[in-house]
Amino acid sequence: MHADKFVSGEPVDVAVALPERPKVRPGNFIQYTVSRLKNLRFTHRKTLNKPDPAAVQKTLFFALMLAVVIVPHVASANDLMASQTGDATDTFGLNSTVLRWIYMGEIVMSLVGFIKTKNPLIFVGLVIMLVISRAFYGMIGT
């Protein structure tokens, strides 16, 4: 045998793409897959001796969101306070007693602040408060 004519038992001029006999696996596909999975080792996972509280909280929150998506009728409910809209508007609405008391308190506080500081810009805060409270209290009951 000369090195120029044979390499690993085959003549140099012959190209071998596939082996002559295909390998036959023992058993069927399922047995082969099970044997391959048994040999697979999960060394990249951490042991779960002490779970991280933040991870547990995120997992529980994700499970809750998933439950709401899967069973949406659990998340929806009837408005039990719908009959109380009139009472809420009367108590906290635009023409309510609460808003009148807030206006009176703001006027008294503005007068006390003006007397103490002698600065007329205190009343700008009164105007701003009146406009903002009028806008926000107008949203109540709608």
Image (cartoon, rainbow, N blue to C red):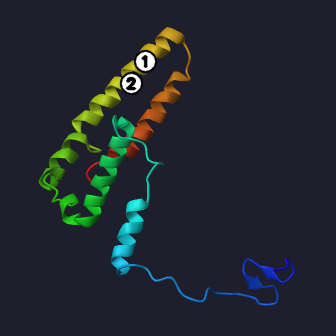
Image x and y of residue 67, in percent: 25, 59
State the residue lying farthest toward the top.
116
The residue beneath circle 1 is 111
Please give left or right for residue 18 compared with residue 2 in the image: left
Residue 11 or residue 2, whichever sits in front? 2
Location of residue 107 in the rendering, given as x and y in whole percent from the top left corner: 39, 24
Q: Is residue 116 above or below residue 106?
A: above
Residue at the spot 79% in from the left edge and 81% down from the top edge = 6
Picture quarter with the N terminus = bottom right
> Which residue is labeled 2 in the image?
107
Q: Quadrant of the C terminus?
A: bottom left
In the depicted structure, whether residue 17 falls above or below residue 60: below
The percent position of residue 3, horizontal first and vertical second, equals: 85, 77
Q: Position of residue 101 (x, y in %)?
A: 27, 29
Query: What is the tally of numbered marks visible in this picture?
Result: 2
Q: Is residue 105 above or below residue 24?
A: above
Query: Residue sitting at 43 percent across and 18 percent down?
Result: 111
